[in-house]
Image: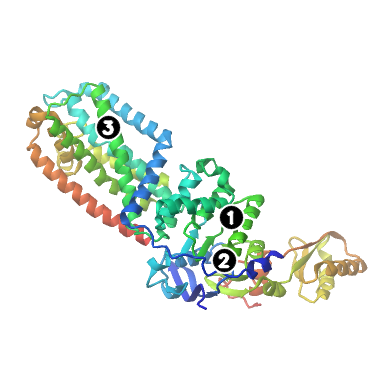
Amino acid sequence: MADASVITGSPLSPARGRVNSGARFWPSTVAVAQRTVRKFVRTPQLIGLATVQSAIFLVIFRYIFGGAINAGGLPYVDFLVPGFVVTGFLWAGMGAAAGVAEDLEQGLFDRLRSLPIPRAAVLAGRGLADTALVTWSLAVGVALGFAVGFRMHGSVAAGLAALGLCVLFSFAFEWVFITIGLFAGNAQAAQGMSVLMTVLVFVSSAYVPVSSMPGWLRPVAEQQPVTPMVNAVRGLAGGPRAGALLPHTTAYYVGLSLIWAAAIVVVFGVVAAVRFSRH
Amino acid sequence: MTPILEARGLTKRFGRTQALAGLDLVAKHGRVVALLGPNGAGKTTFVRAVATLLRPDAGSLQVAGIDALRHPARVRQVIGLAGQFAAVEPAMTGRENLEMIGRLFGLKPRQARAAAGAVLEQLQLTPDAGRLVRTYSGGMRRRLDLGASLVGAPRLLLLDEPTTGLDPGSRVQLWDALRQLVSAGTDVLLTTQYLDEADQLAADIVIIDHGTVIAAGTPAELKSLAGDDVIEVHVRDAEALPDVAAVLSGTGRDPRVDRATRRVSVPVDDGTRRLMEAMRALDHVGAGIEDISLRRPTLDEVFLTFTGKPAGTVGQSSGPEAA
């Protein structure tokens, strides 16, 4: 009360109060991405959990279900590992959806949206960071794959192309998870909604040949994006022997999966951006 | 001089809720304005409109002379926002948090470092600047959050319930930090549910409810209407309530009788003297008194003075009474 006069009595210095130009798109994106990466790196539970989760998954399929699955002439481990690596986006994506929901809930996005930066940079930064993190889990996935007996049968160039596709597909699906995070309302709901994505992963050629599925399910598995993505990577990594088992050429699957990836980025990128700007 | 903030007839509806119902507000340069009101009064909606986080349905809004509806991006260049949650990254250090925001404000790395250092110093967080925020106490997080809105040296600082959920010690610490800022010349608009907070910090208080301003003025002006203090008498027997009320009405204002809790309260100006008078007078009446106290008016009582109804009920019913 006595302090009120002190407060009001202070003259306003004309120098006080800047007009901030704000960071441009790319520096803002990098700054936002850096924060997400730091959060991940400094939360060892996150890395540990993701790694253990995917390792358990791989081991179960390789050693428990694997014996009962007929991969059509290919050793099951060579069939499984490309599918496993491609669908690794699922684990990272669940974390991303929860993270986005959390940032929204806890006001971080409000702070960022009140800053003089392009608003698109906030989501772009998230997408960039999560893609970087997925690349890390991809490396772990590949290492685990080799550890359980997977061997490359394609050329080194084809192997690198396969890895590049995996990164690209993860980037595409990242936008699905960002969209889920923006709509979910809270982290738990985001996690729950992300679990629906497992349907997409299992009703595909990732873990079992589509030909082993019942007739009514086969068209679903064949017409959804994960199957051509897995087939493209499988064809590239497995060489001619794996390619020969696929109904279409590897080039066909690469082309189709690239179209799918582009479509997913455009559709979900726009939905996420609209949701973000209107929130 | 252009007002730092000028809102005319702002409206905003969310579904069936009319969050802002024609809000008018002018905030002058160099004065801290407190927006006081209960939950759901429209305080946060208003702050979010000023921060360009949402677009009002109708009305005009000027921030530092900039049309916020037409040029929201330019408004973002001159404001700093600290929302209801401490929006800082727990997995980064205090310094890293501030440097990140500084970079986003468009500062060069060296400038961002310098600005972060200065703000940390100002908020007495320098000793903890290198620690991860997840090890901070709630009060420290809030101070850092305040700091994040300051690294851009904004013309207008928007604080949405800055001390909600803090323990009394941390609250006082945050108040001190805010006072220093204000004395350095930052214009502040803050929202609060606490009358004492508005009283402590603000030069002007605007009381809002159901999306409109119901009273505005300096703390002194508002209190001269609502009373500086309140004398409250708790009687042993409800039968004594009318007698006590009659005695207290001798202080010049209408006492408020609450039968359920057997209390009579009356707003007074010269609290201590009035209390002594009241005690002498009550002694003559001889009513059985459980407790008698002199206290600050609550937000509810201020509301009652201006609206004739407790906080949060204005406009909901068509009751006949009005202040």
Q: Position of residue B81 (x, y in %)?
A: 48, 60
What label does residue B185 carry, if any?
A: 2
Q: Residue drawn at (40%, 46%), measured in percent from left and top?
A: A35
Residue named by callout 3 = A139
Q: Position of residue A77 (x, y in %)?
A: 20, 24
Which structural element holds mark 3? helix
Residue named by callout 1 = B164
Which structural element holds mark 2? loop
Q: Mark 1 to mark 2: distance in Å?
A: 24 Å
Evaluate whether label 2 is on the same chain as label 3.
no
Evaluate whether label 1 is on the same chain as label 3.
no
Q: Mark 3 belongs to which amino acid? A: Ala
Which part of the image, by quadrant, shows the C terminus of chain B? bottom right
Q: Position of residue A12 (x, y in %)?
A: 57, 70
Q: Mark 1 belongs to which amino acid? A: Thr
Chain on which label 3 sits: A
Chain on which label 1 sits: B
Left or right, residue A47 beside residue A259: right
Q: Residues within 10 Å of mark 2 (few under 14, many from 20)?
A: many
Going from N to C along the chain, the mark reached first, 1 or 2, is: 1
Q: Residue drawn at (11%, 24%), measured in percent from left and top?
A: A73
In the image as oriented, which residue stretches furthest toward the front? Answer: B110
Q: Quadrant of residue A237?
A: top left
Can residue B291 be seen in this snapshot?
A: yes
